[in-house]
Image: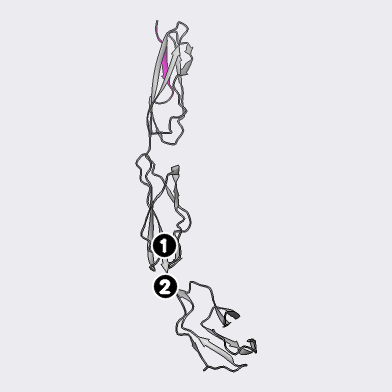
Amino acid sequence: NTDPIITLNGDHEVTVERGTPYTELGATATDYNDEPVTVTITSATDNIGNSVGTYEVTYSATDTAGNLANEIRIVKVQDTIKPIITLNGNAVVYVEQDQDYNDSGATSTEGLTVSTIDDIDISTAGTYTITYSVTDTGGNDADEVTRTVIVYEIKAPENFSFVDTSPFNRGDLIQFNWDHVYEDSIRSNVFDYYIWTIMNGNTTLIAKQLTTNSYTFDTNTLPAEVAEYNI
């Protein structure tokens, strides 16, 4: 009439981090005569580790005389790991003033929805910050991640002038200068080049890609039948 003795493999109480699969170590049992007895796990273990909480794994063994023994293992599932936020796109972005800005957002581990806070005023040049944050179901706050958004105002070349005096005669070399290369209000010389055009009404006669702050062209390249041009 003596029940079998069940011996757990491993500790009676174990701790598992949420999201980490629970590894069952099993148990052994012997009867009164020190003969081995089959141990059966009578509780489901497949979902242990998916959610925070305390779980019991139940073991049972019955000897040839019908004597039944039970044993339990306590499994505590905890959540101590904070989620990690990853930016989509660059940490610093540049946006022209009054142009639409669509943020690329961010993702986090555990598939959580990331919250954002920003004070961007696309109508005003300046430097703005978007802050991304998230908290998981265990109450763990991720380290905040930020993106810098620089809104810049385009500035055209200044002090544009002709070296010679108008009007020009056909065959003249016309030179004009300006103060600096096309730039924006935040980053000097952000553009690699810009284009000067010579127009006859709405028709473009010359479109010249420039990278300096001086340009000279030959009026012989202009159509003879046109008397007046706009630059």
| The C terminus - image quarter | bottom right
Between 137 and 195, the residue placed more toward the observer is 195
In percent of width and height, residue 109 lies at 44, 45
Above or below 51: residue 227: below
Q: Point out the tag, 1 or 2, that comes first from the N-terminus.
A: 1
| Magenta stretch contains residue 95 | no
In percent of width and height, residue 11 lies at 39, 26
In percent of width and height, residue 192 lies at 53, 73
Q: Which mark is residue 149?
A: 1
In the image, what residue type sits under mark 2? Answer: Ser
SS of the residue under disc 1: strand
Magenta segment boundaries in residue numbering:
2-9
| The N terminus - image quarter | top left
User: Position of 208 compared to 180: left or right?
Assistant: right
| Magenta stretch contains residue 6 | yes
Q: Which mark is residue 101?
A: none
Between 215 and 120, the residue placed more toward the observer is 120
Mark 2: few, some, or many residues within 10 Å (few <14, many ≥20)? some
Residue corresponding to mark 2: 185
| Residue visible at 48% across and 56% down in the picture | 89
